[in-house]
Image: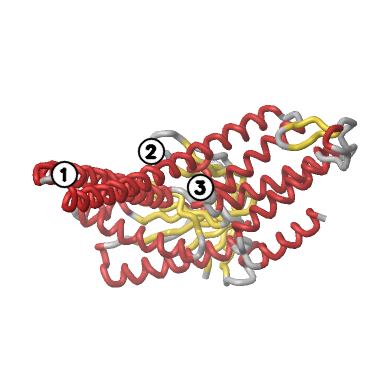
Amino acid sequence: MAIEYEQKALKIDEEIKDKHNEAWARIQIANAYLSLITDTAAKPENHELRHGAYLPAGSIPADKGARLQTAIDYLQRALAVSKEIHAPDIMQSCYENLNRAYKLTGEYKKEIDAADNYLAIKDSIFSLENDKKIVKMGLQNVYERKRFADSVTAMAKEKITTQKLQQQKGYTIMGIAGILLLAGFSFFIVKERAKSETERKKSDALLLNILPEEVASELKVNGTTKARHFENVTVLFTDFVNFTEAGERMKPQALIDELHACFKAFDEITDKYNIEKIKTIGDAYLAVAGLPTADPKHGENAVKAAIEINTFIADRHAKLGNSTFSVRIGIHSGSVVAGIVGVKKFAYDIWGDAVNTAARMEQNSEAGKINISQATYDLVKDNFTCEYRGEIEAKNKGGLKMYFIS
């Protein structure tokens, strides 16, 4: 009954997009499944205490494996949601219950990993709460000292001699000094925490500037990231024509400024179509549609972005002439592997034959043209007019069918 009602609650949480309660609902469902294994209707004296629950004196249910796996699935999904909404208290509960579940499955390495993650998050939460308590204690001491000083001053005016009154004034001054000291200490803690929060936001912004959001979140939570395979993506390459010659006729700063202006526009265009910029290599620009989040329109979006890039460069060339560049673009669709390499100035990058083929498409394109492969053509032919170029020899690839986007 508990599982049935909690699943109804989970459905409502998902419908109203309440991620916080959705994660807690999944934890409750997982706990109920674990209870089906560890609890029984027998009296307490027929049980042995194990990790906060009673194990029956007899055998564990025959469908233990299925129930355990169901509980683990709910906990893993709850963990993913808690990471998404950055809720350490929920993550802590997920790891605590995963530790309990993996102990029952006998997967001791996973049990230890879950326990380590639980303790790490618990320590971070404790540290934050401890800072809050220090500030609170400091403010409370300020209040208590002031109340004491006021009461002693009032007694001195009524009951004690002038000499004692003078002494009391000294005590009052000392009390005020203590108050100011505590107030300054409290202000320092609050200021340092605000400074730390500002620095954290800056570092987060810098991290998101070089990594996809999902990858950045995984890196912050786990300290590492796993490489992933993406089956269906579209890779886009651009390259400026005769860039070396342009560099010879332009001053260095003018060259860099123009390159920055062009790549800034490319960034805005790719961002508009949910395309992930990977990197620039000299005057080349590499981006990919369809990762880290799958996109069924990855081919269409890549071509739309390429058309806007081509139009932007054409308009700019019409205004600036030889003070800017011409561009050629190549596109290919396929599968890639993506991940982070290195530990110093690390970068998110992609690898695979699809990347190499996209580069060949760009190399065999022309100024002001968008050259696509057969794989990309098959994805976009119903939405764009294309001109078949025939099979063209590409370096290390042999003959490849190519099309210009008209």
Question: Rounded to the nearest whole Å, what is the CA distance between mark 2 and mark 3?
Answer: 18 Å
Indicate which disc, 3 or 1, sits on the residue closer to the N terminus. Answer: 1
Callout 3: helix, strand or loop?
A: helix
Please, is residue 99 above or below residue 331 in the view? above
Badge nearest the viewer, 3 or 1 = 1
Q: Is residue 175 left or right of residue 261?
A: left
7 or 317, which lies in front? 7
Residue 18 % position (x, y) = 61, 62
Please tell me the numbered disc located at residue 168. Answer: 1
Question: Rounded to the nearest whole Å, what is the CA distance between mark 2 and mark 1?
Answer: 63 Å
**Residue 381 in sight here:** yes
- Dots 3, 1 in contact, CB < 8 A: no
Please, is residue 323 above or below residue 149 in the view? below
Q: Amino acid at mark 2?
A: Lys
Residue with the mark numbered 2? 345
Please tell me the numbered disc located at residue 217. Answer: 3
The quadrant in which the N terminus is found is bottom right
Q: Tell me what residue is drawn at x 77 percent, y 47 percent.
A: 32
145 or 53, which lies in front? 145
404 or 39, which lies in front? 39
Q: Is residue 287 left or right of residue 21?
A: left
